Amino acid sequence: MKKKTFAILFYVKRTKLLRNGEAPVFMRITVDAIREEMSIQRSINISEWIEKKGCAKSTNPKNRELNHYLEHIRHRLYEIQKELEDENKIVTAELLKNRYMGISEVNVSFVELYAEHNQKMRELIGKGFTISTLKKHETTMKYVVEFMQHKYNRSDILLKEITPDFIREYEHYLRTVKNIANNTTVKYIRNTGKILRLAEQKEIIKKLFYWIFFEISTFISNILSAVFLFMSLFNYFPLSCFIAAFTHNYSFFAQLFYISFYGSCVYV
């Protein structure tokens, strides 16, 4: 299993001075480039802060006490990191921050929520959903479980533990180990995204902006496919034929583009 990068940084917010003229001290937790920040409820005169070292100048008892407190926080966070690893959880910046602050975790797992989703879909077969759609979601859940067993030696994960790196590794698994084609891979990723968006709606997790990448990449891929189809047609027919045909029946060209963009279309 890939070792996660973990960093703790203490800094002052110079642009948000308090009424006493001091700057508030903040802590930044970074795990695999994902950040979480929080105030440590302490402040210091800016001239007494060593930015490169992330600590106060040891020139007086107050600053020395602050430095001692910073080391205490750092030590506690490393303890929490080990606790999470011992609990076989994927360490994230949010989990570290929440446990340090004593915020209770919403322990809803991916498989738990997906199984609930599939059960509700099963009850709606023939009422807006088909058995085919249900089977696709069951296959998606099966592949995610197989991926976790392959990569992390586990069969489930808390929704709060899912990171962009988890999704990237899952996509790589589908393309390499499962040898699944691009369009089908994107569909499995999109199904997984539906469950994560459901978790967002239930306020189990925060908004996941990285899903936008899969939507945009799919859209661009479809656009390029449509363009390549038209380019190939122009190689076989002269431009005058296309102009005449378009003038005669422009709806045909609109539906041809629809076919190339979405992959299927009923011609009426």
Image: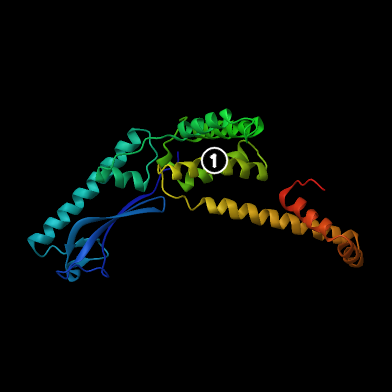
- At 61% across and 54% down in the image, what residue appears? 217
Instruction: From the viewer's perspective, tell me whether residue 165 is left or right of residue 171.
Output: left
Residue 159 image position (x, y, % from top left): 43, 39
What number of labels is visible?
A: 1
Taking depth in this image into account, of 114 and 54 the one nearest to the observer is 114
* Residue at figure coordinates x 22%, y 60% from the top left: 25
Image quadrant assignment for residue 60: bottom left
Q: Nearer the viewer, residue 265 or 146?
A: 265
157 lies left or right of 237: left
Secondary element at tag 1: helix
Pointer 1: what residue?
192
Q: In this orientation, which residue lies closer to the viewer: 44 or 240? A: 240
Other-residue count near label 1 (Cα within 10 Å), few / some / many at <14 / 14–19 / ≥20:
many
Q: Position of residue 186 (x, y in %)?
A: 62, 45
Which residue is rendered at x = 41% and y = 44% of the image? Answer: 205
What amino acid type should be assigned to the residue bearing mark 1? Thr
Residue 46 in the image, given as x and y percentages of width and height: 20, 69
Which residue is outermost to the front?
Answer: 127
Give the x, y percent position of residue 49. 20, 66
Residue at the spot 86% in from the left edge and 61% down from the top edge? 234
